[in-house]
Amino acid sequence: MVIDPSDANFWDGGDGLLPHAAKMGPLDKSDVDRLFRRERVRIVIRDRGGRSREISIDESLQFWQAHARNHTVSPEQVYVSASSMSGEIAYRASEWYDGRGAALVLLEIIR
């Protein structure tokens, strides 16, 4: 699934579309850890149904460490059985640039 700035279902926390989002590349767990050490990180969770939600910048590190890190799969992993993950959810992570000053990590839910 690709972030499409014209997709009306892809909103930021202020009900505005993410302008000019550009994909920087896929991430594994250690890449996301490095981003958190370097800068502030925004996390957006995207479901296959087109719904998205943003974790606030103030809560993103805690969300990553307590939940998402354990559920994030390698970008090279072709097949993922979410049932093998605790809570039956898995994420594929990628980095995006949206011009707002913080790193943006997209966690796409794999079911």
Image (cartoon, helix red, strand yellow):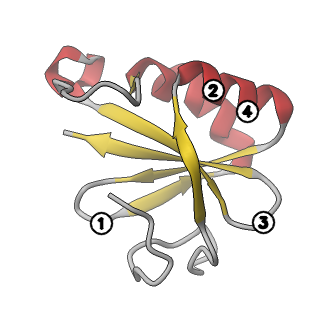
Residue 102, given in percent of the width and then of the height, sits at: 78, 53
Gap in angstroms between the C-alphas marked 1 and 3: 22 Å
Q: Residue at x 39, y 24 (%)?
A: 71
Query: Is 9 left or right of 48, judged from the image as shown?
Result: right
Q: Secondary structure at mark 1?
A: loop
Gap in angstroms between the C-alphas marked 3 and 4: 15 Å
Q: Earlier in the sequence, mark 1 or mark 3?
A: 1
Q: Earlier in the sequence, mark 3 or mark 4?
A: 4
Q: Earlier in the sequence, mark 2 or mark 1?
A: 2
Q: Earlier in the sequence, mark 1 or mark 4?
A: 4
- What residue type is disc 1 on? Gly
The one nearer the camera, 68 or 7, is 7
Q: Earlier in the sequence, mark 3 or mark 2?
A: 2
Q: Compared with residue 66, is residue 54 higher up or lower down, i.e. above or below?
A: below
- Which of the labelled discs sits on residue 50, or is there none? 1
Gap in angstroms between the C-alphas marked 2 and 1: 25 Å
Gap in angstroms between the C-alphas marked 3 and 2: 20 Å
